[in-house]
Amino acid sequence: MKMSRKKKPIPETPHNRQKNYILTEGTPIPPLVDMGVFTKEGKVAAPMQHKYRQINRFLEMIDDTLEERKSLSVVDFGCGKSYLTFVLYYFLTEIKGMDVQMVGLDLKADVIANCNEVAKRYGYSGLRFECGDIGGFAAENRADMVIALHACDTATDHALYHALKMNAKMIFAAPCCQHELNSQIKTETLPLLTRHGVIKERIAALMTDSIRANLVAAQGYRTQLMEFVDLTHTPKNLLIRAVKTQMPSKARTMYKKEVEDLCKAFNLEPLLYKLLNQG
């Protein structure tokens, strides 16, 4: 009779190691259930695995900046239907145990009314939604964190400008539809970059977000450009993540000069630069 051999355990490698997600299965998180990401039992729905990973990745980007905070005020500019707003509120209050006051701002009255109803149904007492534009809200309020994930084209510049004026400690902006510089960009020394429309468009978009990141850094923020996939869009966008820090004036001057040099070389007048210069 042959003796059965015990199977050797499979060694743990980066390929088979179970990832520890911030939002773990087993708890029926209301926003994720309504989005169809979780079942009513708190399990990840099979077709929604990619959304589940995207949401956790976004929360990881937030979590890295929080440090030891007990309370937090958050403004979400252009919140739209607020899928991530609800998830973020849950994460901050239920997982991080923070006292959170969060407001979502959008121009669509019907969307705002629906979001307020959902927040009430979830019992999210520190979360409210208001109908209005970015400038009108920012003029009278302060926030620890500002989020702008749905601001199209130059609306992102206004969101960043008001976040800086509000002296936000953390800024998260995922720009899209960067059209402004595409109509401005000109160069006599590097015509290859602007000869073909599709190349010109992509270069202008990358320049737009590079300039934004530098201008935010010049205001004293540790700024990063990170890959981000919004829940409502499949293309990969860039996320501008900025954290207020003590930055030497020499470094701040350098970041601004880099923007000015680029603008001079390509005949650019970005909106955020003009807004910051006018005060």
Image: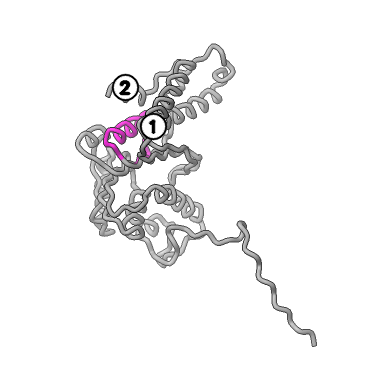
With 133 as the anchor, is 239 left or right in this view? right
Q: What residue lies at 25% left-to-right and 32% top-to-bottom?
A: 135
Q: Is residue 48 above or below residue 205?
A: below
Most distant residue in the bottom direction: 1
Circle 1 Cα neighbour tier, 10 Å, few/some/many (<14 / 14–19 / ≥20) = few
Query: Looking at this rendering, what residue extends furthest in the top direction?
Result: 188
Q: Secondary structure at mark 1?
A: loop
Asked whether, in this view, residue 113 is left or right of residue 193, the answer is: left
- Using the image, determine if residue 39 lies above or below residue 119: below
Outermost left residue = 140
Corner quadrant of residue 11: bottom right
Give whichever of discs 1 and 2 has the lower sequence position: 1
Q: What is the tally of numbered marks visible in this picture?
A: 2
Give me the residue at 53% from left, 23% from top.
Answer: 200
Along the line of sight, which residue is nearer the eye, 264 or 206?
264
Mark 1 residue type: Pro
State how far apart marks 1 and 2 are (Cα). Answer: 20 Å
Residue 277 is marked as: 2
Q: Which residues are magenta?
A: 147-168
Give x and y (percent) for residue 151.
Answer: 36, 35
Task: Tell which of 266 and 218 is nearer to you.
Answer: 218
- Give the position of the N terminus as an image quadrant: bottom right
The tag on residue 248 is 1
| 154 over 115 or under it: above or below | above
Res 157 quadrant in image: top left
Residue 92: within the magenta?
Answer: no
- The residue mark sitting in front, 1 or 2, is 1
